[in-house]
Image: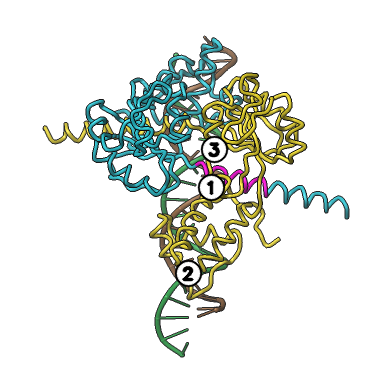
Chain colours: A cyan, B yellow, C green, D brown
Amino acid sequence: MDRKDKVSTTVIRRLPKYHRYLEELHEKGVERISSNELSQLIGFTASQIRQDLNNFGGFGQQGYGYNVKDLQNELSKILGLNRVYNAVVIGAGNLGQALSNYKGFEDVGFKILALADVDKEVVGTEIHDKKVIDFDDLKSFIKEQDVHIGIITVPKEQAQKVADTLVESGVKGIWNFAPVDIEVPNHVIIENVRLNDSLFVLSYFIKEEELRQEMERRQKNK
Amino acid sequence: MDRKDKVSTTVIRRLPKYHRYLEELHEKGVERISSNELSQLIGFTASQIRQDLNNFGGFGQQGYGYNVKDLQNELSKILGLNRVYNAVVIGAGNLGQALSNYKGFEDVGFKILALADVDKEVVGTEIHDKKVIDFDDLKSFIKEQDVHIGIITVPKEQAQKVADTLVESGVKGIWNFAPVDIEVPNHVIIENVRLNDSLFVLSYFIKEEELRQEMERRQKNK
DNA sequence: TAGATTGTTAATCGATTAACAATC
DNA sequence: TAGATTGTTAATCGATTAACAATC
């Protein structure tokens, strides 16, 4: 392995941004870019960009920079995007429906095969061409259809139970939208989307900015 | 001000988690907790917990710990949650509808007043009791209704234009779900929700875990 | 008072930035 | 070859952890 022991998650969480900007550049027909030019676009320092990328290999060339298409490709591979993931959404509520209908995920290789719910009213129906299966049948569905990812959009009270079922069924990863910390064995990857937390952080900074403006005003009136 | 100059965003992004755990404890009837006990629940070190909280004041008491209810209350204030924010969702697609129907936001003081869209087909209709207004009327709506937050759920191509309109209309913050970096003046707070990025990170770690398991298997067979 | 636990300072660790030799 | 720009090492900065005196 030419890869270093382990790359910090701080770095990993920056990779999607590189990926996105390089895709954009590629679409625009840009062929090469230096860490300096990329720095100005993306807002990281050139030094950081070079450090980040060198965690995974020397993708650049001295005196030239980086080939946009190649680098984008490498990033796709690093992120594990050169394949298709099968997914199931558990919880056919509003969020679950929205996610299962979002075309953007399929475009990048995440295929939502079905939704699952406990509500007998919706079980058996179709939502945007996707079947809603019975939660009781989830386990067998996951095994038969080779589902890799479970997407949890159920209320927080049910989230752990759903996660347990997913783990038993053998999914590799869980994308969790429920606002709780879920316990899973080490070999199952969990990625949380904390909508509430994000909103709270927004709230914090709005409050801070209001305070700042208030102080500024007072300063002036003195 | 007894508050330090500026608290790092690293700390700020941990606050919602404290808030959540303390709420849980409070609901369970727990009255007091030490940084050590909280550490075991929440997974941060006791030292970090004390450091974090002391950015905002000495909420604890030597020999006793922290009063759960009081601390939770303080955190609410710090996060700016002791008030109501009015919000509008721009983009009445699936995600926009899901967000505007999610009760959890209103419960914590974020009131979604309406949706806005350009599609004349949906403009004028109601989605979950919320009016869909014409994007052209957004500016006046925001001013009349004292909207603080704009929630962007439009496709990435339109996101900047929507943001510009929101800024002109005087919103204080933008909650952006479009997968682009939006430019706004400094006094407007922007908080991004990067669903794609989150999914990519999940993908990365699934791939890594697969590699790990593969290596383990090879090791054994040697 | 004795025991517990904070608030805070100091030490360590990790991440970012700077610098520059290597090299295309 | 000369100029540009990487890959990488060293320096700096910031965040986390450890330690302990202050104090309830």
Question: What's the chain of the residue with tag 2?
Answer: B
Q: What residue lies at 51% left-to-right and 50% top-to-bottom?
A: B14
Q: Mark 2 or mark 1: which is in front?
A: 2
Give the residues drawn in magenta, as a range. Answer: A195-207
Question: What's the chain of the residue with tag 1?
Answer: B
Q: Name the main secondary structure of what is drawn in magenta.
A: helix
Horizontal and vertical percent position of residue B27: 47, 61
For label 2, the residue is B31
Query: Is C2 above or below relative to B156?
Result: below
Which of D9 and A187 lies nearest the eye of the viewer? A187
Question: Do labels 2 and 1 touch, CB within 8 Å?
Answer: no
Q: Quadrant of the C terminus of chain B?
A: top left
Which of A110 and A187 lies nearest the eye of the viewer? A110
For label 1, the residue is B13
- Amino acid found under the numbered disc labelled 1: Arg
Question: What's the chain of the residue with tag 3?
Answer: B
Q: What residue lies at 27% left-to-right and 38% top-to-bottom?
A: A136
For label 3, the residue is B101
Question: Which element carries disc 3, helix, strand or loop?
Answer: helix
Q: Mark 1 or mark 3: which is in front?
A: 3
Q: Are marks 3 and 2 on the same chain?
A: yes
Sequence-first disc among 3 and 2:
2
Q: Residue furthest left?
A: B222
